[in-house]
Image (cartoon, rainbow, N blue to C red):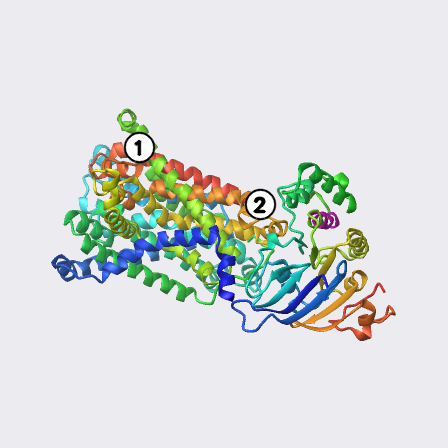
Amino acid sequence: MFVHIRNLAFKYPQAKDHTINDFNLTIDQGEIISILGESGSGKSTILRLIAGLEMPTNGNIMVGDHCMCSNSQFTQPEKRGIGMVFQDYALFPHMTVQDNVKFGLQKWPRKDKKERIHEVLELVGLEDYRKRYPFELSGGQQQRVALARALAPKPKLLLFDEPFSNLDADLQIRIREELRRIIKAAGVTSIFVTHDQDDSQALADRIVVLREGNIVETGTPEDIFGTDCNFSDRMPVKPRVLSRV
Amino acid sequence: MKWLRTLKTYTNIWTILSIVFALFVILPNISIIVQLFSEPNDNWQHIQEYMLQNYIQNTLLLVVFVGGFTLIIGTSLAWLISAYDFPMRRFFQWGMILPLAIPPYIGAYTYHGILNYTGVIQTTLRDQFDVTVNQDYFNIMNMPGAIFILTIFLFPYVFTITKAFLARQSTALVENARLLGSNAWRTFFRVVLPISRAAMIAGVSLVILEVLNDYGVVKYYGIQTFTTAIFQTWFGMGDLNSAIKLAGTLMLIVLAILVVERIMRGRRRYSFTTTKVKLLKPTRLEGKTKWLVFTYCMTIFSLGFIIPVIQLIYWATMAYEQFFEQDFWSLIGNSVFVAFVASILIVVMAVVISNFSRLNRGLLAKTFPKVTILGYSIPGAVIAVGVVTLFTAIDRQLFGFYEWLGFEPTLVLSTSIVMLIFAYVIRYLAVGYNSIESGFERIGTNFTEASRMLGMSVTKSFFKVDMKLIRGAIFGGFILAFIDIMKELPLTLILRPFNFDTLATKAFQYATDEMIQRSAMPSLLIILVSGIAIYVFHHVLEKES
């Protein structure tokens, strides 16, 4: 097991109830996991806990051989070697594409840095845009820059927070195929949270369905949605009109 | 185990510095509260029995009337300028803030100069029309005069806050009221006033805090209030102990006002957050109404800005030579130096505390922003008392250390400029803080989190990302603090080292020494710098939104 999460619990200081209650999950190396749930189900909180942006009230998180967090110890997010693609991408507006990608490589030798920037920008197909500023790019391009930036320092684990919510529908379908290709090519273990079952089905090796902080179902897309395209009668989450299917 | 983990995780330079800075602000206030309950002396008995009632009465009179008048003037102007179109409306939008550029104490002696026996009005009447007037009608140095001065130079607080609210928040409601057939008066009284209550209260409480802080106006006009009483007991009678007790009482009054404000604003915040800001479209006024509204605005603007400035310019032309040959450069140097150093410190402290507060949850992160406001609410004279007691206490503790260093004087810190700068920082921290906090609010925490996920620590993230994104807000906070410090009077008068003068103290001193012409140059300099800042700010903000 590459990622090992045990008994994870979390509560916001002012909240009455726990947002996350006894969450357990193991992930294999190179696997793409999708956490599927409605808004308010606690899926983004889990991502933030793994990233180290929140401190859990209980539980352990292991990534590789390293303990990221236990009841006696907490590794700061910058020391975890985990990458994250934010919902709104959070590209630094005062830096070019190239500088954004370079940002995570501060400790690399200069020559390797250059090579790596070239490599990841090629991977996402934005080699020609390196001198542009984020606001000069389209939504889809911005997302690919965010991906390249997160991939550049070779993270052990890559997290995606609602990666498609800011893209329009057509782009969303094209990009998620592309995204799966890139992640698999990079061979990086990934977790992405989404509320959209189409995304889950198209991208994930395994889906975890979350409701009110608890896992209600887990399995391959086939296990959860069935093999045929028409899975609307087995919707575990809020139904969504699928006119395109 | 968990608390140890929490302690280890959150103990970093930002937390430690935030705690230290918050202590800076709290300590002088605590030293006042502690001594408020110490054994009173005979003097205090005397003050309590014969004078305290008078201080309270005068202070309350000022607060009530200035509060009431600024409320009426500020709100009516805000509504007229937001909802109607008439000549010079665009100018008034920022021009009505200009009276804030004139510190009330400068306004006080300027108006006295205009109205007294040798002033321009009476001389003109005598020379041109051979009319000698009853001096009583032209005497401004009394309670109504002080109310007039404080109202006409402080109403912009109510005006700006209410106008900002009306322009951004009221559009849908006002348009609906109009569509439902409400006429102008009805719309104003039934819709505009109720919805902008929170903004009006916020503006008026700022005015009240300024009134309580004022020393220059009441001192010059000879009205006994808490601030003048603190000065008098301390320097006149040499009784610091009773001064502390007065300061403590005043502080309790301020706290009561803050509590009342909280209660009055209550849960009804009257602001719904819509991301789409739709500006109120002004209705064109025609005919007589147009000129009536224009005259009202122009009268207020003339009283609050044009008339005093023209008078000051006239005086300055009579005496500028003396001013230049004397202490011109050293005054400017002193003013700029203390304001610059204090503003830098304010910005650094504000950045540290607001960055800490936004990146953390928990009790400390929630209390620190409130602590920064403390100093701005508490009158300068009170802060001065607190700072002096604190610094003399520190000096006593360090007595042995000074001897060991070979210093002759026993009071080192409490006679140095450090004390003055320290007091400025406490008093105006909130000014810098507000600006920087709103800058941080605009960028959110996403960029910081992204930077940390890419391997940068909080500190590195701040310098590489956050600081670059809130440059404007940092600069804005610096400028606002700088200007407030340049204008400041009571703190500077009490805490300045021997023979150390700033533009503000010199202007006030010339005026009290009946050398009104010579006070004109330093006064104009202060007004000029503040006026430019107001202009720049208004136009930069306009562009941003």
Classify 10 Å Cα crowding around label 1: few (below 14), some (14-19), many (20 and above). some
- The vertical placement of B324 against B501, above or below, is above
Q: Residue at x 72, y 39 (%)?
A: A130
The residue that mark 2 highlights is B465
Q: For residue A141: magenta?
A: yes
First along the sequence among labels 1 and 2? 1
Q: Residue A26: percent from the left, percent from the top?
A: 71, 66
Amino acid type, mark 1: Leu
Q: Nearer the viewer, residue B489 or A41?
A: A41
Label 1 resides on the chain identified as B
Q: From the viewer's perspective, is residue B19 above or below residue B473?
A: below
Give the x, y percent position of residue B246: 22, 57
Q: Is residue B396 left or right of residue A90?
A: left
Amino acid at the residue labelled 2:
Val
Residue A203, given in percent of the width and then of the height, sits at 79, 60
The C terminus of chain A appears in which quarter of the rendering? bottom right
> Residue A41: in sight, yes or no?
yes
Describe residue B311's horizontal placement relative to residue A18 as left or right. Answer: left
- Is residue B250 found left or right of A207 in the rendered image? left
At 30% from the left edge and 36% from the top edge, which residue is drawn?
B502
Label 1 SS: helix
Q: Which label sits in the foreground, 1 or 2?
A: 2
User: Which residue has dot 1 on it?
Assistant: B331
The majority secondary structure of the magenta stretch comes to helix
Question: Is there CB contact under 8 Å for labels 1 and 2?
Answer: no
Chain ID of residue with mark 2:
B
Q: Which residues are magenta?
A: A139-149
Q: Quadrant of residue A235?
A: bottom right
Q: CA distance from mark 1 to mark 2?
A: 39 Å
Query: What secondary structure is found at the residue carrying circle 2?
Result: helix
Visible residue check, residue B65: no
